[in-house]
Image (cartoon, helix red, strand yellow):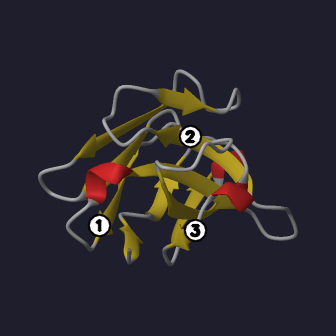
Amino acid sequence: VQLQASGGGLVQAGGSLRLSCAASGRTFTTYHMGWFRQAPGKEREFVGAISGSGGTIYYADSVKGRFTISRDNAKNAVYLQVVSLKPEDTAVYYCAAFNSIYSRTYCLPTSYEYWGRGTQVTVSS
C-alpha cells in the first residue's frame, strides 16, 4: 500500500483544514487507517484512526470534538477534517495503514505497516 497525505497549509488559529490521504491498491477496505502528527522535537503522536469498514473510529483526547476522521473506500481515501485549530496543532501530519488481519492497538505507531509522506499544518496565533 502506498499512501500520500495532502491538504496541509498555513492557517490562523480557529481556522480549519481538510487533510486527505490517498491510498494505492485494490484491497483498501482490509486496512485500518490512522492519522498521526509530529511536531519539531517531539515524538510522533496519535491523532485518530478508523477501521477498514469505517464502523469504528478512535480519537486522541487532545483532538476530540475538533477533528473528524472519515473514509471513502470507493475512492481509496481517508480524510481528517480539522476545525478550531490551535497553535499547538502545528505539526507534520501523517497517514498510516495496517492490515485488519492483525489485532493491534490503533494508537501505537508501531502497529502500522505503511506510512505516507506527511503534510505540514502550521497554525499561527
Sequence order check: which comes first, mark 1 or mark 2? 1
Residue 48's disc is 2
Between 95 and 111, the residue placed more toward the observer is: 111
Label 1: which secondary element: strand
Q: Residue at x 75, y 60 (%)?
A: 44
| Quadrant assignment, res 6 | bottom left
Q: Position of residue 43 (x, y in %)?
A: 83, 62
Rendered position, 88 above or below 4: above
User: Residue 98, image x and y in percent?
Assistant: 51, 58
Q: Position of residue 34 (x, y in %)?
A: 52, 50
Q: Nearer the viewer, mark 2 or mark 3?
A: 3
As helix, strand or loop, the secondary structure at mark 2 comes to strand
Q: Callout 2, which amino acid? A: Gly
Task: Count neighbours of disc 3 (C-alpha within 10 A) and say few if under 14, some if 14 to 19, many if 20 or more.
Answer: few
Res 125 visible = no
On the question of residue 14 being in view, the answer is yes
- Of circles 1 and 3, the one toward us is 3
- In percent of width and height, residue 17 lies at 38, 49
Q: Amino acid at mark 3?
A: Glu
Q: Secondary structure at mark 3?
A: loop
Q: Residue at x 25, y 72 (%)?
A: 25
Q: CA distance from mark 1 to mark 3?
A: 16 Å
Which residue is identified by label 3? Answer: 113
What is the total number of numbered labels drawn onto the structure image?
3
Task: Classify the position of the N terminus by image quarter.
Answer: bottom left
Few, some or many residues within 10 Å of mark 2 (<14, 14–19, 20+): many
Which residue is labeled 1 in the image? 22
